[in-house]
Amino acid sequence: MSQTAVHQCTHAALPLALAGVSDPCSHCESRSISLCSSLDEQGLAALSRITAAVPYAAKTDFVSEGEPATYLFNVTSGTVKLYRLLADGRRQIVGFLSAGDFIGIAVNDRYLYSAETVTPVTVCRFAKSKFKTVLEDYPALEKRLFLMAKNELAAAQDQILLLGRKTARERIASFLVMMDKRGAQPKGAALHAVHLPMSRSDIADYLGLTIETVSRTFTQFRNDGLIRLEGISGVTLLDPDGLAELAEGL
Amino acid sequence: MSQTAVHQCTHAALPLALAGVSDPCSHCESRSISLCSSLDEQGLAALSRITAAVPYAAKTDFVSEGEPATYLFNVTSGTVKLYRLLADGRRQIVGFLSAGDFIGIAVNDRYLYSAETVTPVTVCRFAKSKFKTVLEDYPALEKRLFLMAKNELAAAQDQILLLGRKTARERIASFLVMMDKRGAQPKGAALHAVHLPMSRSDIADYLGLTIETVSRTFTQFRNDGLIRLEGISGVTLLDPDGLAELAEGL
DNA sequence: CGCCGGTTTGATTAAAGTCAAACGATGTGG
DNA sequence: CCACATCGTTTGACTTTAATCAAACCGGCG
């Protein structure tokens, strides 16, 4: 029905000058890796109009599990953790997000988890009601959201396997390999220097372990020559292949 | 082009061209609870044309993790388990499916998990390529798939919390409460008779436990007066509220 | 300098896993 | 029809892994 709105706008580079300096989206650094990559210039402009770029300090809670999902967020810099709590305070971190990741996939219009910044973070914030109207005009955006949901689902199932069946060593190895991949050095780089912005406590709550077990396993890996610890948040993977095998249970 | 491809598929079955009587979808029992509920009569007929109703015996493997996702499935009766394996054979069941559930959300066109029937099962099977053409004509279908993916994601995160932070007792309680809800007696029914079609081994692999721990916890619950065990696959929840509290960690 | 939070290391405990045997349904063949 | 083999389940004894409790350590900061 409203698909007439879709087929236009295949012209190449519209001069950005039109949008002018007031449009934060058109020169956004995470544009190419975020859901915005599914939009043409017009769509970007439409989204830009309903977007507020918001900075948060480290350790700021900005989404609460079960609350009405009035805002959607697109992380543009920094690291965010998503978590759920049990009644007595036990915490499970369900994911770490960084630039390009999206927050707001909701069920019954309620957030599935709480979100807290790990580092200082900037997000693009949209009111959900307004976002929906943009969504209607740009079906590619919904496709992209669907794709992101599928990727989240795949990641969730990786974590289910990890939590259900892997040992502490395998969990830590999986975590290091994942963080290494995420750091995304161009292929096969020799130097696997990984930065871990989150605390040991966060790592523990992500892997279903305790702080002490995380710490002990790190020193074990150091003694085994698998990693080198550089300060508190730096790790170099000395044997990435060995760690990858450990992660798979080999 | 897509139309011709779709027509080819009517070779093996009855003369479907004359809709109505021979159309298996229009009187499908799971129609109202499956993705088909998002389709009008025309859409249903289109889907019907590319559908094959396939029966599987119990314990039949019919989807393999990592394989190209050439078929999609809609469960219409029976119980299916989805699982992932570690290299050495450790198994994690990521979900149990029953009538109305969908199999085939894929990433990079590959299945995320393996699927095996628990009981005798019937599925509606679609070739993915053909399904895609129907999808193009019925956007409501894609919306419905998106909704299902979001629900799966919510369920996956429940399981992450369970596996990462709950005790054996809490896991079993959560499982019983979930199976009770699924059995869906009309609201607040006094009789919480739950049927467990899967083996203890399946339950263990779903909850990240061993067979022995599952068995011991069941007898513990029986001794605590929380449940009554009726034969091998029957359980009655004597204290559903108590179990629900246990499940939440209270 | 000495406090403070997060981290590491150490000693001990507890929860769940492993190994092993008994039990109980179900099905088969003598 | 019953003896017996089989498979999944339950129960028991013991072990192991990771959790808990506790102290020492370390780096940053007022």
Image: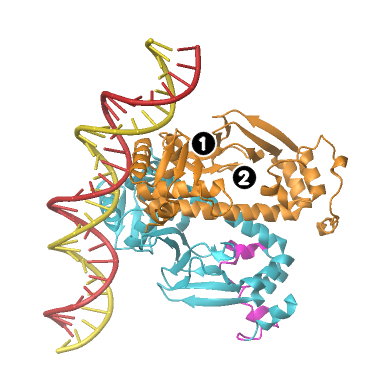
Chain colours: A orange, B cyan, C yellow, D red
**Please, which chain is the residue tagged with disc 1 on?**
A
Residue bearing the label numbered 1: A197
Q: In which quarter of the image is residue A100?
A: top right
Which region of the structure is painted magenta?
A: B12-38
Asked if the stretch drawn in magenta spans residue B27, the answer is: yes
Q: Nearer the viewer, mark 2 or mark 1?
A: 1
Answer left or right for B178 relative to B154.
left
Q: Quadrant of the N terminus of chain A?
A: bottom right
Give how far across and how far down residue A56 sits, in percent: 62, 30
The residue at 72%/66% (across/down) is B136
**Within-10-Å neighbours for mark 2: few <14, some 14–19, many 20+:** many
- Magenta stretch prevailing secondary structure: loop
Numbered label tally: 2
Q: Quadrant of residue B83?
A: bottom left
State how far apart marks 2 and 1 are (Cα).
Answer: 16 Å
Answer left or right for B240 relative to A193.
left
Can you see residue B191? no
- The reply to whether label 2 and label 1 mark residues of one chain is yes
Name the disc covering residue B36, or none.
none
Residue bearing the label numbered 2: A101
Amino acid type, residue under disc 2 in the picture: Asp
Q: Nearer the viewer, residue B151 or A183?
A: A183
Q: In which quarter of the image is the C terminus of chain A?
A: bottom left
* Mark 2 or mark 1, earlier in chain: 2
Give how far across and how far down residue B179 sits, in percent: 42, 55
Asked if the stretch drawn in magenta spans residue A149, the answer is: no
Q: In what element is the residue under mark 1?
A: loop
Give how far across and how far down residue A231 sits, in percent: 45, 33
Answer left or right for B181 relative to B227.
right
